Image (cartoon, rainbow, N blue to C red):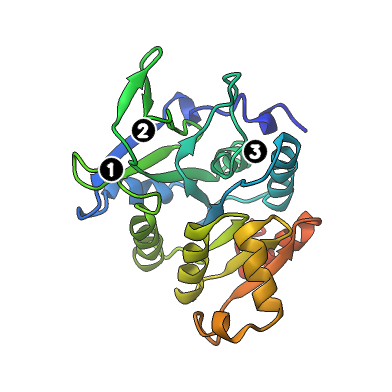
């Protein structure tokens, strides 16, 4: 694996990451919407999920999986906008590291993130901004991070940015002719289940990585079994597909077929 893929050297693009804070009932900031249009290709994919029950080697192989699948991608890579550190102070390879790594290795791609403010904003150590008492940081590997708060005093829930990021993707599709927009989901819990169903109900390409664990595996199994309760929650003409965690080429093939990977 390359040095960049360790995530330890992936920092702010061009030396700066911008941060925008909004209340959940405010209009979406134009600056964030416009940042997406700087990508070479007007396409956007949300990378959702989590890394529950995954050790360091599992996370390293996850990074390798996505970097191989997204090789040549030049659109918007989009995820939660946080960064976590290990007890040793090194970058923890979470889902939220993937957009920065993809953009770092693919000139023309743009990494963006959203995050709910789940606690009080504060400064620790040498003026490092944190979102909560767990010292969750904004991810500086992204060009811009949008923080969504539930008013100035009350913390938001962990799904507090879902409405905003879905509306951002709709606005890119509607106002800037982004095509396609969609999501790829790895592992994850209850919030990820909501994201998968919402993405499918938007009519967008929705890719589940089987073998990644938890929510993704549960939904992949239900789709394979044609579970009637699950199928009743998504459109008949859904674009929900399952790819294999053991073979990144299955994800790459889906990205090609949906139009996320383009030839020029």
Residue 1 shown left or right of residue 208 in the figure? right
CA separation in Å, label 2 and label 3: 31 Å
Mark 2 neighbour class, 10 Å CA radius: few under 14, some 14 to 19, many 20 or more: some
Q: Position of residue 39 (x, y in %)?
A: 49, 48
Q: Position of residue 237 (x, y in %)?
A: 55, 85
Q: Is residue 135 above or below residue 157?
A: above
- The residue that label 2 is drawn on is 132
- Of marks 2 and 3, the one in the foreground: 2
Residue 43 in view here: no
Q: Residue at x 59, y 43 (%)?
A: 98
Mark 1 neighbour class, 10 Å CA radius: few under 14, some 14 to 19, many 20 or more: some
Q: Residue at x 72, y 38 (%)?
A: 60
Sequence-wise, which precedes: disc 3 or disc 1?
Answer: 3
Q: Which mark is residue 155?
A: 1
Q: Residue 220 occupies which quadrant of the picture? A: bottom right
Asked if the residues shown at circle 2 and circle 3 are in contact, with their CB atoms under 8 angstroms apart, the answer is no
Q: Position of residue 87 (x, y in %)?
A: 58, 22
Sequence-wise, which precedes: disc 2 or disc 1?
Answer: 2
Observer-nearest of 114 and 259: 114
Q: Position of residue 25 (x, y in %)?
A: 20, 55
Q: Residue at x 24, y 48 (%)?
A: 150
Residue 78 shown left or right of residue 31 in the figure? right
- The residue that label 3 is drawn on is 105
CA separation in Å, label 2 and label 1: 9 Å
Asked if the residues shown at circle 2 and circle 1 are in contact, with their CB atoms under 8 angstroms apart, the answer is yes
**Secondary structure of the residue carrying numbered label 2:** loop
């Amino acid at each position: 694996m390359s040095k960049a893929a360790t995530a330890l050297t992936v920092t702010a693009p061009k030396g700066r990451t911008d941060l925008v804070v909004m209340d959940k009932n405010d209009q979406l900031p134009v600056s964030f919407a416009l940042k997406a249009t700087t990508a070479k290709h007007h396409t956007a994919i949300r990378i959702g999920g989590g890394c529950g029950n995954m050790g360091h080697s599992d996370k390293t192989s996850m990074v390798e999986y996505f970097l191989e699948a997204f090789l040549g991608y030049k659109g918007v890579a989009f995820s939660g906008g946080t960064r976590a550190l290990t007890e040793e102070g090194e970058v923890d390879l979470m889902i939220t590291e993937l957009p920065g790594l993809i953009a770092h290795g693919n000139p023309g791609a743009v990494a963006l993130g959203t995050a709910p403010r789940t606690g009080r904003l504060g400064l620790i150590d040498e003026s490092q901004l944190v979102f909560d008492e767990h010292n969750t940081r904004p991810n500086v590997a992204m060009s811009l991070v949008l923080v969504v708060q539930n008013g100035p005093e009350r913390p938001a829930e962990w799904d507090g940015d879902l409405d905003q990021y879905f509306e951002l993707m709709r606005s890119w599709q509607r106002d800037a002719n982004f095509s396609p927009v969609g999501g790829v989901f790895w592992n994850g819990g209850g919030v990820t289940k909501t994201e998968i169903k919402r993405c499918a109900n938007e009519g967008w390409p929705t890719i589940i990585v089987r073998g990644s664990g938890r929510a993704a595996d549960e939904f992949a199994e239900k789709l394979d079994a044609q579970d009637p309760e699950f199928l009743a929650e998504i459109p008949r003409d859904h674009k929900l597909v399952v790819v294999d965690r053991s073979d990144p080429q299955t994800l790459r093939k889906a990205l090609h077929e949906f139009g996320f990977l383009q030839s020029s």
